[in-house]
Image (cartoon, rainbow, N blue to C red):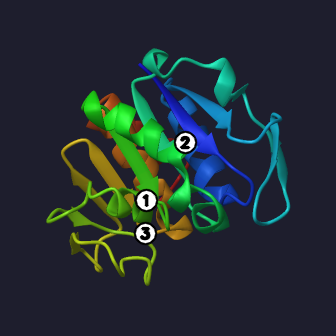
Amino acid sequence: MKGLMLIKENFELCEALITIDLLRRADIVIDTISLNDELRVMSQSNVEIKCDHLLKDIDLNDYSFLIIPGGKAVFNYHINSDVTMGIIKHFNNHKQLIACICAAPMVLGKMGLLDNKPFVCYPGCETGINGKYQKNKKVVINENIITSKGMGTTFEFAQAIITYVKDQETAKKVINSVYYG
């Protein structure tokens, strides 16, 4: 099972890197996909990373799940991007995991994928989403969609993804190995 993470200028660095690190510790393959015209992408905190691939160089059918970190990239790009929404549709049509953190659930909300469903996101980003906002939860899992609140919940977010993709035992082992909690 192999996943992809969409990376666009002004993404939230910690949400991306901590999730990648924990998934790779669980022996889950996760590729970073640049939505820019080059592999290097600048985070909202001005840290540049080099992605694994450009979007034009991959086949979505080679992947089993999708992760979208939050940050200004959601407001500046994802929320109005036919590219992002097309990728989400691909994974949703195949009933594959879609995991969004921070502001990224707003894109799912705009697409109607959270209608009448429980979800969580960064406080204030729930406005306009026709779902059931779970303000006291850090992570919400609903069918093939995982949502999480923000950078401070990244460990729980990654743990939920590992549990979904592999199993709870592997997720606990990884979380315990980094002395979280």
Q: Which SS class for mark 2?
A: helix
Q: Amino acid at mark 2?
A: Val
Q: Amino acid at mark 1?
A: Val
Q: Is residue 95 above or below residue 17?
A: above
Measuring 50% from the left and 58% from the top, which residue is drawn there?
154
Q: Distance between the Cα atoms at labels 3 and 2?
A: 24 Å
In percent of width and height, residue 130 lies at 23, 72
Q: Is residue 71 left or right of residue 154?
A: right
In percent of width and height, residue 178 lies at 56, 47
Measuring 51% from the left and 61% from the top, which residue is drawn there?
79
Question: Which residue, given by chain and number where applicable, does mark 1 sit on?
Answer: 107
Q: Is residue 131 left or right of residue 10?
A: left
- Residue 149 marker: 3
Front label number (3 vs 2): 2
In percent of width and height, residue 155 lies at 48, 55
- Residue 83 marker: 2
Crowding at mark 2 (Cα within 10 Å: few <14, some 14-19, many 20+) = few
| Precedes in sequence: disc 3 or disc 1 | 1
In percent of width and height, residue 137 lies at 29, 71
Q: Is residue 13 left or right of residue 113?
A: right
Task: Give the camera-side residue of 57 and 153.
Answer: 57
Measuring 75% from the left and 65% from the top, which residue is drawn there?
44
| Quadrant into which the C terminus falls | bottom left
| Residue situated furthest left in the rendering | 116
| Precedes in sequence: disc 3 or disc 2 | 2
